[in-house]
């Protein structure tokens, strides 16, 4: 377990922030009037999380183990997202689960995967 805290500290902090943001009651703002702004927020949350995950993976590995990336960098964040949506639907009274939020989260994960592989990987590995 200590291995993950050493190699992925920012990613673990972001997971904690995502959990917090997923279960607190947000204040009312004028931004709610923008159609689908919450979907953009979901894409950015999970896209940012998985971009940091890619960064932390690539800085400590000199080759990509696709089995690890598939399970830890794609499937696990998407599954986490689905679990959070189910918990919001069934365990809270102030939040609701939304499958479009799940789709937005999954889109963020997949966009971060493309960014990680095609942008971060060449940048980080070029320096070493």
Image: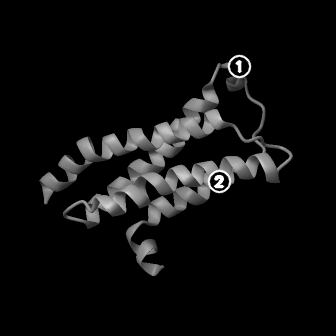
Where is residue 34 drawn, in percent x and y? Answer: 65, 19
x and y, in percent, of residue 47 in the image: 46, 42
Q: Earlier in the sequence, mark 1 or mark 2?
A: 1
Name the residue at 66% across, 51% down. Answer: 84
Residue drawn 35% across the image and 58% down it:
69
Q: Is residue 27 left or right of residue 81?
A: right
Q: CA distance from mark 1 to mark 2?
A: 27 Å
Classed neighbour count for the residue bearing mark 1: other residues with Cα under 10 Å, few (<14), some (14–19), many (≥20): few
What element does badge 2 sit on?
A: helix
Q: Position of residue 44 (x, y in %)?
A: 50, 38
Q: Residue at x 65, y 55 (%)?
A: 19
Q: Which mark is residue 33?
A: 1
Mark on residue 24? none
Which is nearer the eye, 102 or 62?
A: 102
Determine the residue positioned at 43% across, 51% down: 74
Please give the label number shown on residue 83.
2
Q: Secondary structure at mark 1?
A: helix
User: Which color scheme is applied?
Assistant: one colour
Q: Can you name the residue that lies furthest to the right here? A: 93
């Amino acid at each position: 377990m200590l291995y993950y805290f050493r190699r992925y500290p920012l990613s673990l902090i972001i997971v904690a922030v995502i959990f917090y943001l997923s279960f607190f009651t947000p204040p009312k703002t004028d931004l709610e009037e923008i159609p689908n702004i919450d979907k953009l927020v979901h894409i950015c949350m999970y896209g940012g999380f998985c971009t940091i995950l890619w960064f932390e993976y690539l800085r400590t590995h000199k080759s990509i183990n696709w089995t690890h990336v598939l399970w830890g960098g794609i499937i696990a964040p998407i599954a986490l997202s689905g679990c959070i949506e189910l918990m919001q639907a069934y365990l809270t009274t102030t939040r609701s689960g939304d499958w479009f939020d799940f789709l937005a989260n999954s889109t963020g994960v997949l966009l971060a995967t493309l960014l990680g592989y095609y942008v971060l990987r060449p940048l980080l590995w070029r320096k070493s």
